[in-house]
Amino acid sequence: MPPVVVNAAMLSCTMGLGPPMPLTAIPKGSPVTAGGQQVATIADAIPMANIPTFGMCNSPANPAVIAATAAALGVHTPMPCLPVPIGVWAPGSTAVVLGGVPVLTAPSTCQCSWAGTISIGMPGQTSVNANG
C-alpha cells in the first residue's frame, strides 16, 4: 500500500537542475486531509499551480534550451524550467478516489513534454496509505 501524497510533497524532475520542490495540492470541495495536509489527486498536474519550476531545465528537447544552445554556437545551455506535464499523474490509487478522481500515491510519476519524468521523492506524510 503506497503512501498517499499530500500538499507540500517533494517533487523532482529528471531534467531539472534545481533542488526538490513542493507540490501544491488544490482542495477539491470539502477539504480532505492526511497528516494535517490536503490530499492530492492525479489531477494535481497543472504547471506552476501544482507542479513548480525545478530551477533550470537541462533537456535537449526543450525549445528554449535548443534556442539557447544554438545561440551559444552549439554549447549546451540550460534554460529556466517551465514544466509542461503531459496529462495527469499515473498510476495513482486504484482503491481510493476523491471527488471521482484517484488519489495521488507516492510511486506515481508525471511526464513532461520536454522529456523529463517528474517523481515524488517524499509524499508529505507517512501515516496514511491507499491501496495502489
Image (spheres, rainbow, N blue to C red):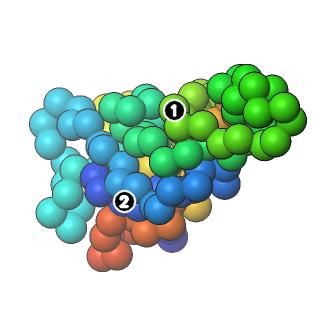
Looking at the picture, how far across and down is residue 22, in whole percent? 35, 54
Closest to the observer, 123 or 63? 63
Task: Check disc 1 and report its element: helix, strand or loop.
Answer: loop
49 is higher (above) or lower (below) than 78: above
Quadrant of the rendering where the C terminus is positioned: bottom right
Looking at the picture, how far across and down is residue 72, in whole percent? 76, 33
Q: Which mark is residue 118?
A: none
> Residue at label 2?
9
CA gap, disc 2 and disc 1: 19 Å
Q: Quadrant of residue 36?
A: bottom left
Q: Is residue 68 visible?
A: yes
Q: Residues within 10 Å of mark 2 (few under 14, many from 20)?
A: many
Q: Is residue 113 left or right of residue 119?
A: right
Closest to the observer, 25 or 55? 55
Task: Check disc 2 and report its element: helix, strand or loop.
Answer: loop
Give the mark nearest the N terminus, 2 or 1: 2
Question: Looking at numbered disc 2 in the image, what kind of residue is underneath it?
Answer: Ala
Q: Residue at x 28, y 52 (%)?
A: 7
